[in-house]
Image (spheres, rainbow, N blue to C red):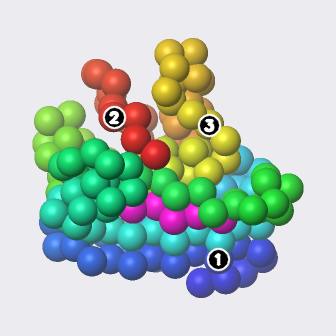
């Protein structure tokens, strides 16, 4: 859907977690608003572990599934708005949610927020940047009306 310079496309190709597209779009819009983003074209692909493993191998050369992969498609930089694709493994989200003790759809939303922050320029490859990104994730999750992520250990740092 497109309104006010924000276009969000959600393609749900999985069966592991019930994710309402309207709910996830609201999360994305609130997250973008919190980051001050007024122009964006974001596509979100929800998949299972097998498809995520194929994407992970094809685009990053790493075998096996991961939680989220972000593809930054912005040509003109942040001034031109955010443009990108975010692929999320809902099976990984379901497993992690069970391990961490919270709702699977909240874990999936956390992955989407993480991907959006990558598109906004945050990174998590070095400790200081990772700490800054984790702090921003908490702020954005709260702004989106979501609970604080119950992170006991660092998550994978894939893009």
Asked if residue 38 is among those painted magenta in the image, a careful observer would answer: no
Name which of mark 2 and mark 3 comes first in the sequence.
3
Residue 86 position, x and y percent, is 46, 61
The answer to whether mark 1 and mark 3 are in CB contact below 8 A is no
Q: Which residue is labeled 3 in the image?
A: 122
Q: Which residue is labeled 1 in the image?
A: 7
In the figure, is residue 77 to the left or right of 26?
right
Seen at 18% across and 59% down, the residue is 49
Residue 87 position, x and y percent, is 39, 62
Crowdedness near tag 1: few (<14), some (14–19) or many (≥20) residues, C-alpha within 10 Å = some
Q: In this picture, which residue range is highlighted in magenta?
A: 83-90
Residue 59 position, x and y percent, is 39, 57
Can you name the residue that lies furthest to the bottom here?
Answer: 1
Seen at 22% across and 73% down, the residue is 14
Seen at 58% across and 45% down, the residue is 117
Name which of mark 1 and mark 3 comes first in the sequence.
1
Q: Distance between the residues labelled 2 and 3?
A: 15 Å
Seen at 62% across and 51% down, the residue is 119
The majority secondary structure of the magenta stretch comes to strand
Residue 23 position, x and y percent, is 44, 69
Label ID, residue 156: 2
SS at mark 3 in the image: loop
């Amino acid at each position: 859907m497109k309104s006010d310079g924000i276009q969000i496309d959600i393609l749900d190709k999985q069966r592991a977690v019930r994710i309402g597209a309207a709910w996830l779009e609201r999360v994305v819009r609130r997250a973008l608003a919190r980051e001050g983003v007024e122009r964006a074209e974001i596509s979100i692909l929800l998949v299972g572990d097998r498809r995520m493993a194929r994407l992970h191998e094809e685009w990053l050369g790493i075998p096996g599934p991961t939680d989220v992969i972000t593809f930054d498609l912005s040509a003109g930089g942040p001034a031109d708005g955010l443009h990108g694709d975010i692929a999320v493994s809902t099976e990984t989200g379901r497993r992690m949610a069970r391990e961490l003790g919270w709702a699977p759809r909240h874990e999936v939303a956390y992955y989407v927020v993480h991907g959006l922050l990558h598109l906004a320029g945050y990174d998590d490859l070095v400790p200081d940047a990772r700490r800054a990104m984790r702090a921003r994730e908490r702020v954005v999750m709260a702004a989106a009306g979501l609970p604080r992520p119950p992170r006991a250990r660092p998550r994978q740092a894939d893009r």
